[in-house]
Amino acid sequence: MLANAITKFLICNLQFFIYIGKLFSLIIKFVAKFMLMIEQIEEYLAQVDQFNSSNNEEIEQFRIQFNGKKGILNDLFAQFKNVPNEQKKEFGQKINTLKAAVANKLQNLKAATTSQIVSVKEDLTKPGFPLTLGSRHPISLVKNRITEIFKSIGFAVADGPEIEDDWHNFSALNLPEYHPARDMQDTFFIEKNPDVLLRTHTSSVQIRYLENNEPPIRILSPGRVFRNEAISARSHCIFHQIEGLYIDENVSFADLKQTIQYFTTELFGKSKIRMRPSYFPFTEPSAEVDVYWGLNSETDYRITKGTGWLEIMGCGMVDPAVLQNVNIDADKYSGYAFGMGIERIVMLLYQMNDIRMFFDNDVRMLEQFKTS
Ligand code: DAH
């Protein structure tokens, strides 16, 4: 009876059950489809994350694939309306994440490629900046010229420190303690007792070289020297000297005179010189060398004070006491030395009338010495 009633009920409502079944399968399909889409978006996200390229075409392809009219993002947005209401929120969030990831990726890739393009654009075809040539300082020009002249007759260049001790700057050069050159007014002292000072002349290199070398010796030492003098158009507390020293057997005053005459002829084109007796503690006899400049122009009158003669250096035969100070046999060896100020010679050659110009570092002055 009961069974009958159930069967009847089932048969009457069969249609209804079929509908219910269909509805269920539809819902399951929907949910499954939605799950698949979420998974698909996850895959897209991974794809975006991994994409990298510096090739503009590849980047454009990527952009079209995701952002194009028929691209992935538009497709996903179109499907949004089919998503069941409960899932809309999650789905929407996922698409937006993907959209942001794509935009971010495109921005980064573009920034990287444009910076590359800028750096390439900036350099490829432009001509390079011309190398601006400087000029040698006139002091260096003249120093080099003088060095060349003496090199051509067998002199080598020797160097010494600008900070010296008393022995090399004074004592070994036979400068007695009461000599005015030791006066505080002339010398810049760095320390006293024992004295450390800025060398007042390049003669100190004579001692340094003689201490470490055996005759025959033929050296030239250009360099900076320092004296505590008031700065004016004619004198400066820093200037340059060139020292010469020749020690060998049988060196005579005639050798000295001949060498200097050769030098003045080479440098000034003037061979007429005179040697006036003078005094230097480290030479005996000592002399001052004058070049006959002539009196052909007003300038000649001015620079020679109307005498025609121009003083250019001090010199003399090396005092045997100096040789003894450096343990060189003064009976066997003799020699000559000379020293000259470079600034004076530069001023003479280039007709400059203010020594301060050498140290001002004014390019307008320096540019005049450009060679090309
Ligand atoms: N040292 C000297 C000075 O500064 C110049 C000098 C004179 C150097 C005579 C010498 C020399 O070698 O023999 O005034």
Image (tube, rainbow, N blue to C red):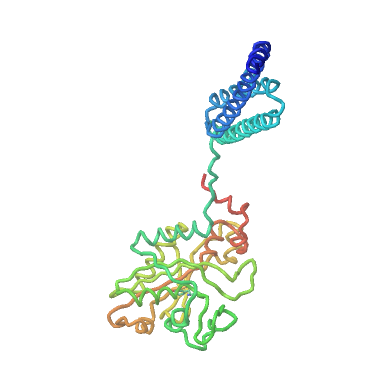
Q: Looking at the image, which is closer to me, 154 or 87?
A: 87
How many numbered discs? 0
Q: Residue at x 53, y 37 (%)?
A: 128
Q: Position of residue 234 (x, y in %)?
A: 61, 67
Q: Looking at the image, which is closer to me, 172 or 28?
A: 28
- Of all residues shown, which one is farthest toward the front? 1
Q: Looking at the image, which is closer to me, 293 or 24?
A: 24
Q: Position of residue 3 (x, y in %)?
A: 63, 17
Q: Position of residue 154 (x, y in %)?
A: 33, 63
Seen in the picture, residue 13 relative to 372 is either above or below; the reply is above
Seen in the picture, residue 117 relative to 4 is either above or below; the reply is below
> Which quadrant: the N terminus?
top right
Q: Looking at the image, which is closer to me, 240 or 124?
A: 124
Can residue 260 be seen here? Answer: yes
Q: Position of residue 204 (x, y in %)?
A: 44, 75
Can residue 251 be seen here? Answer: no
* Quarter holding residue 6: top right
- Of all residues shown, which one is farthest toward the bottom? 178
